[in-house]
Image: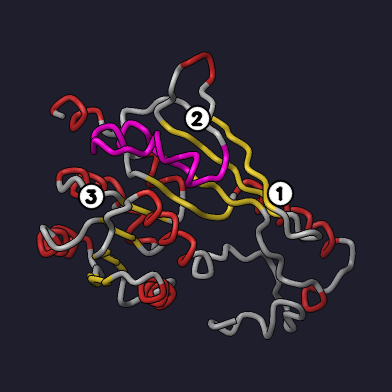
Amino acid sequence: MVAGVVKSLARPGGNATGLSLQRSDAAGKRIELLREVVPNLRRLAITYNGGNPLDMHEAQVATRILGLEAVTSDIRLPEDIIPAFDALKGRVEAIYVCADPLAVTNRVRINTLALEMRLPTMFASREFVEVGELMSYGANFFELYRRAAELVDKILRGAKPADLPVEQPTKFDLIFNLTTAKALRHTLLQMLPTVIGTQCEWRSGVRPRQLFVEQETSPRTGTTRFRQLYVPTTTCARRLLERA
């Protein structure tokens, strides 16, 4: 709605409809989860692209509500990344990276710098965790793709986009990279039951390199359930882990 693509979520108007990622809306939840995982969190770095701020405002509001001090860092170009991280050394206990194409493209570089500084990180999508960042929380893309196909089918059958409400995600992925947690000497394994509100059981007694927790909220009842899944082992933080 901010971009003017639709008039409202319930009645888009015009010739467009679709699905929301709720990236900005979930910013507060991400920071809340990060605080649960980093109990000593007092100062949080928020990196963002000033030319495309997206969830920057929501992240700042969330830090104030949670009583945290926000240290903001504007990264608009790839060459801004290293100076921005250098400026954060010794000033923060964790990093929140706002969703942005620049951050996604340079996620390996961001991961490397964060690991060298031994700082826990939070992102909006699993692509970051797969290259070694600590955790992410965001809408389940695969479910959105399936539902997008259903919207296309309705339109091809004659429905008008203006009359089809913009749908909200009901499944969210909460993903932890356990290799990174170990490399950071983090107590994440002991804290997981508190963070996700359920006991963590490891298949065959083997702890995977990544823990994938799928959160599904029922649109009808508003109730939430968690389902634990496991993803393949990666080499996310192997070099740092070998030095730890």
Q: Main structural element of the magenta stretch: helix, strand or loop?
A: helix
The quarter in which the N terminus is drawn is bottom right
| Residue 52 visible (yes or no) | no
Way the structure is coloured: secondary structure
Could you say which is closer to the camera, residue 81 or residue 116? 116
Which residue carries the number 2 mark?
Answer: 231
| Residue at 73% over, 78% down | 15
Badge nearest the viewer, 2 or 3: 3
Helix, strand, or loop for circle 2?
loop
Q: Is residue 89 left or right of residue 227?
A: left
- Can you give x and y, in whole percent of width and height, for residue 222 in the image? 73, 60
The x and y percentages for residue 49 are: 31, 71
N-terminal label among 2 and 1? 1
Which badge, 2 or 3, is on the more N-terminal residue?
A: 3
Earlier-in-chain disc, 1 versus 3: 3
User: Which corner quadrant of the image does residue 51 belong to?
Assistant: bottom left
In reply to whether residue 197 is colored magenta, the answer given is yes
Looking at the picture, does residue 49 appear above or below residue 99? below
Q: Are marks 2 and 3 in contact (CB under 8 Å)?
A: no
Q: Is residue 234 above or below residue 126?
A: above
Q: Amino acid at mark 3?
A: Leu
Residue, disc 3: 119
